[in-house]
Image (spheres, helix red, strand yellow):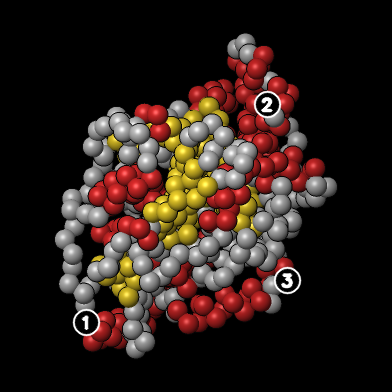
Amino acid sequence: MDRLSGLDASFLYFESGTMLMHVCGLLALDQSTMPEEYEFTRLRDRIGERVGSNRMFRRKLHDHLLNLDHPVWVDDADFDIEHHVRRAFVPAPGGREELAAVCGDIASQPLDRGRPLWEFWVLEGLADGSIAVMTKMHHATVDGVSGASLVTELCSLEPGAPPMTSSPPSPKGDRPSDARIIVDGALRMVRRPVKFARLLPPTVGTVGGWVDRARRGRAMPAPFTAPRTSFNGTITGHRAVAYSRMDLAEVKEVKNAFGCTVNDVVLTMCSGALRKYLTDRGELPDQSLVAMVPVSVHGKSSAPGTNKVSGMFSSLASDIDDPVERLRAIADQNLVAKEHHKTLSASILQDWAQFAAPNTFAMAVRVYSKLRLAERHPVIHNLVISNVPGPPMPIYFLGARITGFYPFGPVFDGAGLNVTVLSNDGHLDVGLIACRELAPNLWELADDMPIALAELLDAARKQTGAPTPSDSSPKRVRRAARA
């Protein structure tokens, strides 16, 4: 029986009309590389051919009123590709703002839980004649790493080549009877007190260790210590998206100049853009912003389920004006945070999520949102910043070259902004998604990303004595971004 893990199921329980628990991705495509001329129905049918043999695309939720445990996955006997691959038209003039508005509308709509939890939207009408695809998958069925892997099921290294990765065809499984679901759920519920007793002592030890590390200055930032900003409030169901693209070689040039990691540079770039965004709004806090950084534990956790993720709190040193000093502060803090994170069990989040109760969680989420409790207690963290590895070479989506792959994660009450960075073909593709009411000018933040990187790059070249091209100065980048 393919029962959801507690962490996978938690994304179902947390979902409401305002907190939508799907992850999205915008694929910018050059259809001129396709072996055949682009035509929507042909593209849809080819997607259907590739996903039809993969059970990850065919499975849907099934539950019973008397089931005491999490739902199960079953094959959709009525799977129809037309329910999952749709088309939409970007209004004139078909620029990035119009494209992002359509993507925001798609991200604002929940997935149909009566069908497999994914959709692809083919977007036409772009000013340059290209097409785009907005992917949408529920977090209950993918995390950042597995979601990117699923997309590669449709991609190849050459326009007419077979997929570069391909799961073996998965036969349709027998649907479990309701009686089996109920009995198995009851047995799992009976065993929960024993599991709880086993988990409690090491968890208490983790809390004590955190306190001890904090006293010695060797702990990551604690939750509920972040300053409040305009995007740390109660969210609505409306989403705004924006995106940006940078040269990965420039990020690595900064990394090499200052002896840090790519992730340190990414966080510093985000911090610099957030400083500019908040300063322009007159609300930059004196205290540093705190990001929650998801950490993949694929290969480290033996816990069941699709989502293999942990989390790390990271200071963004946004209270430091100088970009180099900010980078050094973030790099130092990240070393401490990583050391602290290694002391935590890789499966602690999955282990505790097994105790998630659907009705209790769903009711708590709605009460929390209705009473706007996110605005009544200290901020847990300001935003989520995720860094996802992607393909280092050009790849082709059903023959169309991917010229941009911008990921968008979920947002939550109290943290209405998500920034996800994906490395793709020598670039960093940055996707930003936010509650539209809490971050109405998201393009300003997106445009400040390359400016923040340019400031770091300028400082790196001064550090190493390398020449600075005239088109890479922060002022030049700022003018290009605004254009």
**Residue found 68% across the figure and 39% down from its top:** 273
Measured Cα–Cα span from mark 1 to mark 3: 45 Å
Residue wearing tag 3: 376
Disc with the residue nearer the chain's start (2 vs 3): 3
Q: Residue at x 61, y 49 (%)?
A: 101
Foreground of the two, 281 or 343: 281
Q: Please tell me whether residue 99 is drawn above or below residue 5 in the rendered image.
A: above
Numbered mark located on residue 295 in the image = none
Q: Residues within 10 Å of mark 3 (few under 14, many from 20)?
A: few
Instruction: Locate residue 86, reporting x and y percent.
Output: 42, 54
Give the SS element for disc 1. Answer: loop
Q: Nearer the viewer, mark 1 or mark 3?
A: 1
Name the residue type under label 2: Ala
- Work out whether 121 lies above or below 196: above
Q: Position of residue 428 (x, y in %)?
A: 51, 34
Which quarter of the rendered picture does the N terminus lie within?
bottom left
Q: Name the residue that disc number 1 marks.
A: 177
Question: 443 or 315, which lies in front?
Answer: 443
Q: Nearer the viewer, residue 16 or 203?
A: 16
Q: Nearer the viewer, residue 106 or 307?
A: 106
- Is 404 left, or right, of 478 in this rendering? left
Horizontal side of 358 relative to 468 (left or right) equals left
Name the residue type under label 1: Ser
| Residue matched to label 2 | 480
Cα separation, mark 2 vs mark 3, equals: 41 Å
**C-alpha distance separating marks 1 and 2:** 60 Å
Q: Quadrant of the C terminus?
A: top right
Name the front one of labels 2 and 3: 2
* Residue 335 visible in rendering: no
Q: From the viewer's perspective, is 133 left or right of 300? A: right
> Label 3 sits on what residue type?
Arg
Residue 442 in the figure: left or right of residue 70: right
